[in-house]
Image (cartoon, helix red, strand yellow):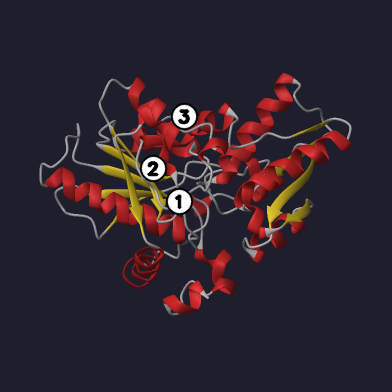
Amino acid sequence: MTTHREPLDSVLETVGETPLVRVHASPDEVPVYAKLETFNPGASVKDRIGKHMLERMLEDGTVSPGGTVIEPTAGNTGIGFAVAAGQLDVDAVFVVPERFSVEKQQLMRALGAEVVNTPSEDGMSRAIERAHELAEELDDAVVPQQFRNPLNAESHYATTAPEVFDALDGEVGAIVAGMGTGGTLMGMADYAREQGVDTRIVGVQPAGSTYGDLFGEETEEGEYKTEGIGTHDVSTNELVDPEKLDDLKTFSDEAIHGEMARLAREEGQLVASSAAANSLAAVEVAAEIRDGDVDAPHDTVVTVFCDSSERYLSKGVYREFAEWQG
């Protein structure tokens, strides 16, 4: 977060150092704190991986200045990469399933990127395939592949987690985060484990997602409106290591929709569905710690509010639930 104490040379210098703010629905005995990632220049947590991954790939020669980065993305990763690419002399192309936020796609184009759509019913699997097809057609093109590239998790190991531990003087009882690629939670989990404390690590998904398959659970695949987290095919989410997780929380779209409205109305937090899911899970984990149902080294819980609800207004996130589902 920019401090306004001195001028900065590039928008990339404003990525990270986002505020950590109390979630007031959490119990007094075990407060929940959320990283407000809308304070990044591209207004989402994905700015972190856009900057980190592209800088590292330029450093190691994976892509050259003037080359092209091609990424399958639901939107925010594209915006994060587009912000970085525009400042680092790299062209950007993003492959996006049609059903995802129109606002995000408009922002990617505004930042100078090309957007290629794939059919919604084909999911992210087809978007991934199409990205690789395009990379083969171009010279000096690379697919960073946020779903399997360890630089994704590394960006949160290097930035998000240290910021959290510094802000709370190392007293982090639990980390709770939605799993889309899994990079945020895996990177923060790795950092937490290195601190020598048994921080509780909890993943979050919407009902209909199949991350439970990784834990030997019987899962019922279904459609969900919650964006940015969840999966229909765990084989594409190669960063997720179930051995690093203590629990997986699942919430219905209806509960998530209600929490989006509550966060806006009661806490002034204009955040989207993934943040609402994280909020529900984090408050639940805090109650479990308070009641002694689970063990945690400290009486604090940290989560991530990934992006803003403003990117989903055209989808009716603040209308009646039935309208949002329609």
Dot 3 crowding, Cα within 10 Å, few <14, some 14–19, many 20+: many
Residue 60 lies, with reference to residue 83, above or below; the image says: above
Looking at this view, is 215 or 108 the one in front?
A: 215
The residue furthest left is: 291
Q: Earlier in the sequence, mark 1 or mark 3?
A: 3
- Residue under numbered circle 1: 209
Disc 2 vs disc 1: Cβ atoms closer than 8 Å? Answer: yes
- Side (left or right) of 133 relative to 228: right
Residue underneath mark 2: 212
Q: Residues within 10 Å of mark 2 (few under 14, many from 20)?
A: some
Q: CA distance from mark 1 to mark 3?
A: 25 Å
**Front-lying residue, 122 or 260:** 122
Kind of residue at disc 2? Gly
Whole-angstrom CA distance, mark 2 to mark 1, is: 8 Å
Sequence-earlier tag: 2 or 3: 3
What number of labels is visible? 3
> Which amino acid type is marked by label 3?
Tyr
The local secondary structure at tag 3 comes to: helix
Percent from the top left, x then y, of residue 295?
Answer: 17, 34
